[in-house]
Amino acid sequence: MTTDIIRGVPRGTADIPLSILELATVGEGHTPADALRSATELARSAEDWGYHRIWVAEHHGMPGVASSSPAVLIAHLAAATRAIRIGSGGVMLPNHAPLVVAEQFGTLHALHPGRIDLGLGRAPGTDMATANALRRSADIDPDEFPQQVAELTSFLDGAFPGDHPYAKIQAIPRSADRPPIWLLGSSGFSARLAGLLGLPFAFAHHFSAANTEPALDLYRSSFRPSEVLSEPYALIGVAAVAADTEAEALRQAMPGALSWLRMRRGTPGLFPSPETAEAYAYTPMETEFVRDRLSNVIYGDADGVRAGLEELRKRTGADELMITTMVHGAEARLRSYRLIAEAYGMTS
């Protein structure tokens, strides 16, 4: 495996690659089928606009999110595109047997060689009751994540020691190379592990902004060169909304804040519309929550969003920005991503 399949090529006037995190958001008045069609349209457009990769997240039990099965959605998006990298952002490894993940991504790599990324997280991506149903057991220790990563890597590489209980088990299909493994995180645990293993690291700045710089510092200070990377490579997820005016961008961003509020209250639902967000009667405490949430979203017109992204890039030293745009409706979302691409001169 070479570093070239991890490090992207900046497009237009961007200093680093820009990518997309997709959740297949199901908005009010829409269906999961609508959300998945929108995700496909976004992948095709993102490829034309010069984005480097598009990842899909794993979430369960959330009516407003249709990306519960990353491997299935990745297969569909990769078949609908030509060259853009497609991956998981990420597969929540404790929910799955490592052998199953190795088989799924070995299949994806065989179907779309050189285009698949395997991003791994250690959180459940859901509530614990749903996590237990997924795992068929409540006896899962998140601290076993390093061992699970090692087991998955050994299945992908066919590299178990001869005396290992799984030494004779083959994850098929398997090829001489394999999809690059990324570790995802929102704290220091995966940052340090990614550094020690010499793997690329993706940090969830979009919902853990206060931990971004400490986690990236820990990743870089812990980094040990590997066959995958000779030096650290850090991607950060960024919430951003671009529109024709700052006022319209704020209007489009408000439903995302309300969606987070509902999730924190334990009442997730379909992704709200701007009209629903405007009509909602916020308590003072909820107003403060929304204000805090919006402070972590870069929103404005195209030039304003680019300026915000550039400030974040310089402050964190990120090697790649992965933008997630949580708005209601495919049209507003596509326009936001297009405006950002145009601001960087990425579109043809």
Image (tube, rainbow, N blue to C red):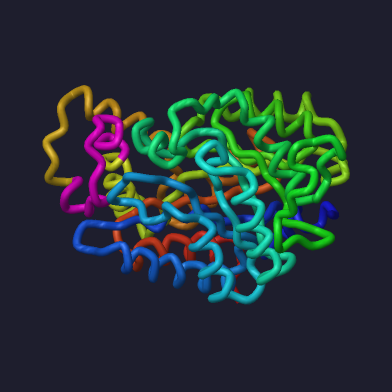
Is 146 displayed left or right of 3 in the figure?
left
Give the total number of marks visible in the rendering.
0
x and y, in percent, of residue 88 in the image: 57, 52
**Residue located 37% across and 56% down the image:** 66
Query: Could you tell me which residue is drawn at 28 percent across and 42 percent down?
Result: 259
Write down the quadrant of residue 261 in the picture. Answer: top left
Q: Is residue 22 above or below residue 298?
A: below
Q: 284 above or below 207?
A: above
Quarter of the image for residue 217 reads top right
Res 313 seen here:
yes
Q: Residue at x 70, y 60 (%)?
A: 172
Could you tell me which quadrant the C terminus lies in? Answer: bottom right
Coordinates of residue 111 in the picture (x, y in percent):
66, 71
Rendered view: 127 above or below 270? above
Residue 40, magenta (yes or no): no
Q: Is residue 93 left or right of residue 330?
A: right
Q: Vertical placement of 12 versus 279: above or below? A: below
Q: 207 or 253, which lies in front?
A: 207
Given residues 337 and 135, the one toward you in this image is 135
- In depth, the one of 197 and 200 nearer the eye is 197
Q: Quarter of the image containing the N terminus?
A: bottom right
* Side (left or right) of 106 relative to 32: right
Q: Is residue 53 left or right of residue 65?
A: right
Q: Which residue does the image show at 25% across and 32% down from the upper left?
A: 266
Q: Is residue 271 on the magenta stretch?
A: yes
Q: Which stretch appears magenta?
A: 260-277
